[in-house]
């Protein structure tokens, strides 16, 4: 399927040099929140966006925001504790988190949520029943930290209505995260209220990341901030050791944007730049899941002025599928797997036919098992790997975007016998047969002796509540059998310029680079190797966007937001 290109956006201001207070590079959640925070603090603000549409990775995301101590938790009767959240975050960072930044995140994130709701039409709700990704760890919460933006009416944007970036995956069904959970999108796709969803789309309603980006864009437009789209930042301008603006290109012309107070880098990560991913990441990245514009522009700008770097080996990992022929903005379209593999009648195997991980674990940590390196063979034995399912899965569950009862695409490998399927896709047949037999014996009794699948509450969350004896375990026994190639994807990278608690970029020789700030995937996240819960990526974006915007405008946040009791 070829995703059509977006219609041309409203004309940007004429290409001429611009004097302002704060220049923000990027129009995802990090950039929009930074611009809004700076404008609310009285600064004149300019937003630059490389693409012809607005919203960045945010607009095509699930839209959830993971915020400990948020004020919406009370609606679920959940109390949170700052020390508990810090304990949890510290463990997940795996020794690569900066405690000062983790503390800054915990202090500012609840305030950022309140700010967004006060300054924009965005409204959040805590998602009932959505646990942290490691709910059994000390300091985790069983629900409440994941916030969900409510549906947004794109008609509120006027001439910018059709200029929010469209997701080729999430954009087809306007629903909230909470509705996705309540409707069991993966486990009961045939029962979705299709007429209601279609009516919403016809009205111009959007959900998830598009709702967050749309509401934030409405707010910045309300401040008279018209994004300069199709405008690419080329180099930072420095005077006396201070960043005083940047030079960009627009319609083939060079423009200088002078910033009296500061420049905020919020233009995403480097996952689509194969040179940078090969140099920096701790494992191979085959299938980036963000817009193809994410090519490390912010990273190069920061490095050019001596920025210190951190967390460069990490990404927001996610297993991904490729459907033959699908493309997005001239590049292959890759589809994330957030929970399909956690359903009954499904396992992951490597080319030896062996299971190697708890398939129901969260997508970020699951991908780390792909990187296992065998020093003897000098290769990664778990790549490539395959999702193996049977007809029972196909008859019940969502398979990429296939709804039960509709024809399966011809490209999907299938066979009446497991051995035949294995030979067709390059899996050792004997290993696959033995793995399925062993898994089936445990699944029939409701347990997984090899990897403990289904023990965690998070494992069961993505399962089928109607399946017995276990929501996440079901035998692979009903022919035909199917195999889908799975490879390493990423929602974005997690490394970049190191910042302090005020989102100020740090110099490699120590101290801050005056006038330069970073947020979102354009900075080194304080979460290190971890992914605490659904919405962590956007939580990092809105929190440090909020801190960067205020600091650039001369109103840094006080050390404590006062939200924590």
Image: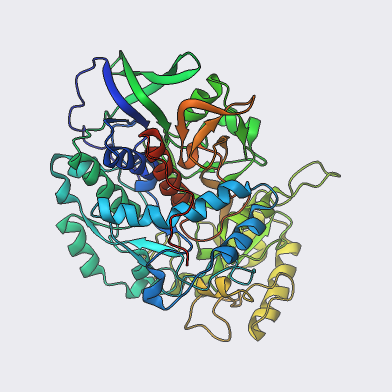
Residue positioned 64% across, 56% down in the render: 90
Relative to 544, is 79 above or below? below
Residue 466 at what x, y percent from top left?
Answer: 47, 83
- Tell whether 370 sits left or right of 483: right
Residue 13 at what x, y percent from top left?
Answer: 20, 23
- Tell whether 23 sits left or right of 496: left
Residue positioned 40% across, 19% down in the render: 244
The one of 365 and 113 positioned closer to us in this rendering: 113
The one of 103 and 308 positioned closer to us in this rendering: 103
The one of 22 and 196 positioned closer to us in this rendering: 22
**Is residue 171 something that shows in the picture?**
no
Residue 391 at what x, y percent from top left?
Answer: 51, 72
- Tell whether 175 sits left or right of 426: left
**Is residue 223 something that shows in the picture?**
yes
The one of 112 and 277 positioned closer to us in this rendering: 112
- Tell whether 400 sits left or right of 344: left
């Amino acid at each position: 399927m070829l995703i059509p290109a977006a219609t041309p956006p409203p004309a940007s201001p004429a290409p001429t040099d611009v004097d302002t207070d704060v220049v923000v590079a990027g129009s995802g959640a990090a950039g929009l929140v930074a611009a809004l925070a700076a404008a609310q603090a009285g600064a004149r603000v300019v937003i630059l966006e490389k693409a012809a549409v607005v919203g960045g990775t945010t607009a095509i995301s699930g839209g959830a925001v993971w915020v400990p101590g948020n004020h919406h938790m009370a609606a679920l009767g959940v109390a949170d504790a700052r020390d508990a959240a810090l304990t949890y975050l510290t463990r997940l960072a795996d020794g690569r988190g900066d405690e000062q930044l983790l503390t800054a995140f915990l202090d500012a994130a609840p305030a950022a949520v309140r700010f967004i709701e006060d300054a924009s039409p965005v409204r959040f709700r805590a998602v009932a029943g959505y646990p942290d990704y490691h709910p059994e760890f000390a300091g985790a919460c069983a629900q409440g930290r994941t916030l969900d933006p409510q549906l947004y009416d794109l008609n509120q944007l006027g001439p910018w209505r059709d200029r929010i970036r469209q997701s080729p995956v999430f954009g087809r069904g306007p629903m909230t995260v909470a509705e996705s959970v309540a409707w069991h999108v993966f486990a009961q796709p045939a029962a979705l209220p299709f007429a209601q969803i279609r009516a919403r789309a016809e009205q111009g309603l959007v959900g998830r990341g598009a709702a967050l980006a749309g509401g934030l864009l409405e707010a910045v437009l309300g401040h008279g901030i018209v994004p300069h789209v199709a405008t690419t930042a080329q180099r930072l301008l420095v005077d006396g050791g201070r960043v005083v603006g940047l030079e960009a290109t627009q319609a083939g012309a060079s423009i200088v944007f002078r910033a009296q107070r500061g420049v905020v880098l919020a233009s995403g990560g480097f996952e689509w730049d194969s040179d940078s991913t090969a140099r920096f990441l701790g494992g191979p990245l085959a299938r980036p899941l963000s817009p193809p514009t994410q090519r490390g522009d912010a990273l190069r700008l920061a490095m050019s002025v001596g920025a210190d770097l951190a967390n460069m080996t990490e990404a927001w990992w996610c297993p991904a599928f490729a459907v033959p022929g699908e493309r997005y903005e001239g590049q292959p379209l890759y589809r994330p797997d957030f929970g399909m593999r956690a359903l009954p009648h499904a396992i992951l195997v490597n080319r030896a036919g062996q299971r190697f991980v708890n398939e129901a674990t969260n997508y970020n940590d699951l991908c780390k098992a792909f990187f296992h390196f065998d020093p003897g063979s000098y290769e990664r034995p778990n790549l490539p790997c395959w999702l193996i399912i049977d007809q029972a899965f196909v008859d019940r569950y969502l398979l990429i975007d296939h709804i039960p009862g509709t024809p399966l695409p011809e490209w999907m490998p299938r066979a009446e016998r497991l051995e035949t399927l294995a030979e067709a896709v390059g899996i050792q047949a004997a290993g696959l047969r033995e793995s399925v037999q062993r898994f089936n014996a445990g699944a029939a009794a409701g347990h997984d002796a090899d990897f403990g699948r289904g023990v965690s509450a998070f494992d069961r969350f993505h399962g089928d509540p109607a399946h017995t004896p276990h929501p996440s375990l079901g035998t692979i026994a009903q022919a035909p059998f199917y195999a889908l190639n799975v490879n390493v994807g990423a929602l974005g990278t997690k490394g970049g310029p190191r910042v302090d608690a005020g989102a100020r970029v740090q110099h490699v020789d120590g101290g801050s680079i005056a006038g330069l700030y970073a947020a979102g995937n354009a900075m080194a996240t304080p979460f290190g190797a971890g992914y605490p819960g659904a919405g962590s990526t956007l939580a990092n974006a809105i929190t440090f966007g909020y801190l960067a915007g205020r600091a650039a405008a001369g109103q840094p946040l006080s050390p404590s937001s006062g939200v924590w009791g």
